[in-house]
Amino acid sequence: MTNTDPTLQKIEKAPQTLRDIVQARLREAIIDGRFAPGERLVERPLCDQLGVSRTVIRETIRFLEAEGLVEIIPNRGPIVSTLSWDQARQIYDIRVQLEGASAAACAQAHRKGFEKDLGRALKAVGAAQNDTEWSNLLQATTRFYELMFLQAGHSIAWDIVQRLNGRISRLRALTLAARDRERSGMSHMTAIHDAILSGDPVKARQAVKNHIADAAQTARGFLENSEI
């Protein structure tokens, strides 16, 4: 019998294009510190290493410039951006406002079944804690926050965070590497998870505030007298 149902199966994850792959690899290299702040990004070696055309490299550099990971310097070309404590402080201030509001809204109204989704996302963060590749932990962390923002109905705020994501990831890699934190990032994220699912918006907002304040203090120790 012929199936006349016109419904198509939803694509859960779109396949990556070549440009997406190159962007991800170069972004990870910058976040990992394989390219130092201020270092020039020369097209020919990048083309040779990645096996792609200059057009793809140029598109990637423009994309990473928009994320704040690359600067275009007149008469010098693209370099890896530096990140000062003053810039980091501003990013943390933005995160407190946007993440705090999203956590509070999410605590007040989340759909049935969201508990499992957020729980799986938190579990993925925990599973990536000891990975040798920073990218796995950063991706898992980003997914956790994406769920929170979108469930809160704060899609525009998430778009803003995404534009800062390159610099946020650099700061996360920096603070995750610190071994002298009084409280781990995983502990803070568990507190955010628990507060959201308890349905307490005040507690959820405070959990976010505590997490970011701790991360900011750690980053300040690295950046106040230097840049990354």
Image: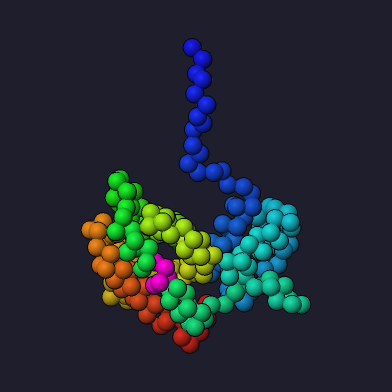
x and y percentages locating residue 67 in the rendered image: 58, 66
Image location (x, y in percent) of residue 143: 42, 55
Question: Is 96 situated above or below 56?
Answer: below
Name the residue furthest right: 75
Residue under the image location 47 percent in, 63 percent down: 157
Quarter assignment of residue 202: bottom left
Q: How many marks?
A: 0
- Measuring 68% from the left and 52% from the top, which residue is drawn there? 51
> Left or right: 163 with respect to 109?
right
Image point (67%, 68%), residue name: 41
User: Which image quarter: residue 193?
Assistant: bottom left
Q: Residue at x 42, y 68 (%)?
A: 98
> Residue 129 at what x, y percent from top left?
36, 59
Eyeballing the image, is 25 above or below 170? above
Magenta residues?
A: 95-99
Relative horizontal placement of residue 131, taking residue 9 as reference (left or right): left
Residue 42 visible here: yes
In the image, 160 versus 53, the foreground residue is: 160
**Is 182 on the left-hand or right-hand side of 50?**
left
55 horizontally vs 19: left or right:
right
- Asked if residue 187 can be seen in this view, the reply is no
> Residue 190 location, x and y as percent?
28, 61
For the residue pair 223 and 12, the one nearer the viewer reads as 12
Q: Main secondary structure of the magenta part?
A: helix
Q: Is residue 173 magenta?
A: no
